[in-house]
Amino acid sequence: MRYLLTILYLSGLHAFSPAVADESGTLDYEFAISVEKSELNDLSLGDDPDLERLEEEEIEFEFGLEYWPNDQLHFFFVGALKDETETEKPRGDRDSLSGLERKEIGVGYLFGDEIASDLNVGRMEFVSASEWWLWWDEELDGIRLESAYGSIDTMFGVTEEQARESTGLDRIDPEMEDVRRVMASLAWEFADNHSLLFYYLDQQDDSKSYYSGFGSFDDCNDGPPAPACVSEDRDKIDDEDADLTWAGIGYLGEFEIEAVGDFEIELHYAEVDGDEVIYEFDDPDPVTKLSEVTGRRENSVDGSARGYLVSWTPAALEDWSFTLSRAIGAGDGNPDDDRDKSFRQTGLQGDIDAFGELFQPELSNLEVRAIGVVWEAYDGVKIGLLGYDYRQDRLADEMRDAALEIDPIGLDRDLGREVDLTLTVEAYGGMEFTLIAAEFEAGEAYGANAGETSRFVKFELSYEF
């Protein structure tokens, strides 16, 4: 696939010539700068005194160009100069990344009369329809065809990372390298403000395997090296290889009931199945910083998830909206067999703050209930208050993904509760200010740490010009 992309890029550059760029050519550009700073306190709920606070800072200058030589051919580029820093205190561990990030770059071609289509080759942003139930929200290298016919919009794409994301990195992200994805979606607006959504994603992970079929974890001297004989830099490897297929359906609808108000409704259902290999590692060697591969587990995967969201804007309070939502990702009732019934998200869902700014859980072995209110106090000024309640679907002594650095003990499903307060101010001329404050209180699932709290605050200032 990498050779195919190279050929198509060169073909596009050949087309981008003075002969093509006549007087009808147009050039659009935009710039934006943003500053973010956040602090997460009690990262381990008091369990680890060396993990009391996580500080993150990010400065980004983004610039985008789009050139249309004619009405069909277009070239696009979106890049960002970024400086990111993450510091764990009081331990003092600090990770920094600075460089030019390639967000979008490629060539597109519009064609078709009855079926209008847009073919793009390069790095593009893939975004799903719902901001609450995210299938994908990521920039990916690949080929994409988007088409529209009447009330039906379709997307088909094939993606695989071709190069490192930023000049500040020395390699492709291990979780993305050698992973080929086939993606498709269909949106059918069968009535005004009522749409059915269909999603499909097939993932084939061809990254490195650590087991040759010989030897054992207990004996490294019999035959070729077994996994226990291999040491790796954890930052350079992916500890999960998964060949999985996701499929899902959703409904988005809007209703207006006179004297009652406006309603927005979302309904979602998704399934995942396939096979995965999970590797286990010991603690890094203090000198070499390498971790030994100590285990390998194969699972067949078969999980499902479902959820809904209802938003109501009262007729008498047009500046207020109230939301109620629930999502359930199935868990696995028997972790000792080779069948995993836990749902997991695609890994392309971008920032996973849809279910809480602080806890940020992945929808796997999890039930999330949320209730909230948003008030537009003034034009461009919004205040939101959201509350979350988290429970495991099945008892387990670990979470697939969450922001806190502590695992549950596996004796209770009550993970805890979170409250988020957000303030958004859209100022004149493209400036936006966002302030987020959140608090999480641990539930009985965290044993002796139940009742402990963690606090989060985030500040963001952005300006588009």
Image (tube, grey):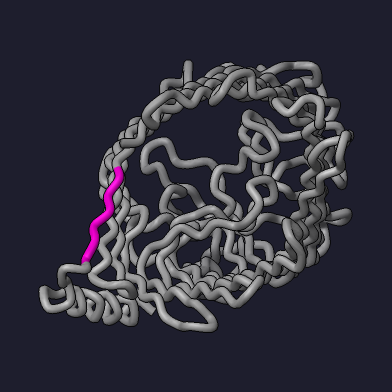
- Residue 296 lies, with reference to residue 325, above or below; the image says below
Give the main secondary structure, helix, strand or loop, of the magenta stretch: strand
Q: Is residue 344 visible?
A: yes
Q: Which image quarter is the N terminus in?
A: bottom left
Quarter of the image for residue 216 reads bottom right
Q: Is residue 59 left or right of residue 259?
A: left
Total residue callouts = 0
Name the residue: 56% across, 23% down: 379
Name the residue: 68% across, 33% down: 356
Q: Which residues are magenta?
A: 25-30
Q: Which image quarter is the C terminus in?
A: top left
Q: Is residue 23 left or right of residue 203?
A: left
Name the residue: 71% across, 23% down: 385
Q: Is residue 50 visible?
A: no
Along the line of sight, the residue nearer the viewer: 195 or 303: 195
Q: Is residue 238 left or right of residue 318?
A: left
Quarter of the image for residue 71 reads bottom left
- Residue 390 lies, with reference to residue 457, above or below; the image says below
Q: Residue furthest left?
A: 18
Residue 313 in magenta stretch: no
**x, y (%) of residue 282?**
56, 46
**x, y (%) of residue 444?**
85, 26
Along the line of sight, the residue nearer the viewer: 384 or 57: 384
**x, y (%) of residue 312?**
80, 36
Name the residue: 41% across, 80% down: 111
